Each structure stands twice: as structure tokens, then as C-alpha cells.
Image (cartoon, rainbow, N blue to C red):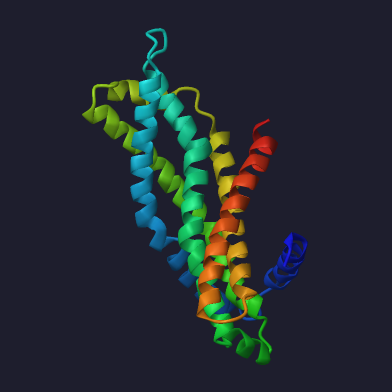
Amino acid sequence: MNVIEHTGSYVLLMRQVLTRPDRHSLFLRQLINEIHKVGFDSLGIVAIISVFMGMVVTIQTAYNIDSPLIPLSMVGFTARQSVILEFSPTIISLILAGKVGSSIASEIGTMRVTEQIDALEVMGINSANFLILPKVIAAMLFNPVLIIFSIGLSLLGGYFVALFTSLFTPGDYVTGLRFSFEGFTVFYALIKTVVFAFLITTVSAYQGYIIKGGALEVGRSSTTAVVRSSILIILFNLILTQLLLT
């Protein structure tokens, strides 16, 4: 299938997915389960990456500020802007594309090759809505929470650098964090996160939903889902930055 065919198939699948659930009580149970799988199971890796990412960004910023005319408080300011505007929403979303996206593609792909999806359709159930919509809603609700969590831990990682090195003082760092803060930067990060969450879940689910074959194709669909989700995240990162910050 070429790009146009894939795009058309994806749009048609989204028409099936984005419909009203038939049974709201069952949908809510699935949504809670998906929030746990998509969100809470990712807290560990998000925490580890965020702390060390914040430390590295802060150290690199301090290393490059070598002019006595630039106050050391600019380390905290620059680290804050880098983390909020780019590192947490984009890098963490790329990590989630690998972790969550591959899981979704393999789960739905396995259901496709074992004919569980066919069984749902025989029973008159909208399989796309039943299987995919809870994952999409769960990611769009919880991924912003993960990003706020990531931002906080990244800035805390920068504070650890101030505590345990002599590059700058904790006071300088905190002053920089507070300097000229604009709430829109966090809003911008959350907008990107919601869009990225939609892309990760829908593209990965699509790759699993359309596969044909056996276990080998399930593995290939997982890899393809991660690659395509990552490319779309980078593309929409550029588009959203151009729309929201210019």
C-alpha cells in the first residue's frame, strides 16, 4: 500500500473509531484499564529519563555560559525553557511511541491474526470503536499528566546539579526558574502532548488492525508503528511550533 492508500484506510478506520460507544459502562471499565496500561505503567521510565535529561540539559547549559557578562541565573531560565518547550513534550512522547505504540500494535495485531476481531464483528460489535477508542481517550487524558510529571522531575534534576556541583548555586538556579515565566509555554507543551498522544495511539492501532498473516507480521507491524508514529511526532512538532509560537 502506498501513502495515499494508507492515508485513506486510516481516515476510514478513524470514522469507525470516533463514534459513540454502544455500552457506556463497558467503555468506562476499558478506559480505566487503558489508563493504567498506557499511563501508570509508564511512570517509571518517564521519571528516570526526566531526571537525567534535566541534569544533562542543565550541565550543558552551564558549560556553554562562559561569559562573565551573563548571570548564572540564566542557567535555570534556559533549562526551564528547553524542558518545557521541547524536551519533555517531544522526547517523552517519542519514548512513549516506542513503549506504548509497540504494545498497542502488537496487542491489536495479535487479536487480528487470531481472528478475535472477526469474532467481534460477527457479533455485530464495532471492533474498531470497542478496541481503539478507550486507548485513544486514555492516552489523551493521561499523557499530559505524564508530561507535567516529566517537567517537574527534569527541573528537579537541574536542581540536583546545583546542589552537588560547583557550576552554579541553587539560589541562582531557582532565580532563573522564576525569571520571566509565561504560563502559555506550559499550555503549548500540553497541546503538543495531546496531539502526539492521538497520533501514537491511532497510528499504532491502525498498524495492528490492518495486518494479515501470522506472528511475524505482528512483529513487523509493531516496528512500523513506532517508526511512523515517531516521524509524525517530529512533523507535527514542527507544524504546531510554527502555528503556536510564531
Q: Is residue 155 above or below residue 124?
A: above
Front-most of residues 45 and 73 = 45
Q: Is residue 172 above or below residue 151?
A: above
Front-most of residues 4 and 184 = 4
Q: Is residue 122 above or below residue 214?
A: below
Q: Can I make out residue 163 in this image?
A: yes
Percent x, y of residue 17 = 67, 71
Could you say which quadrant of the image residue 225 lies in?
A: bottom right
Percent x, y of residue 230 = 56, 53
Q: Say left or right for 124 vs 38.
A: right
Could you say which quadrant of the image residue 9 lies in?
A: bottom right
Percent x, y of residue 40 = 40, 61
Residue for point 40% across, 20% down: 64
> Which image quarter is the C terminus in?
top right
Percent x, y of residue 21 = 65, 76
Q: Residue furthest left?
A: 164
Residue for point 64% across, 37% down: 241
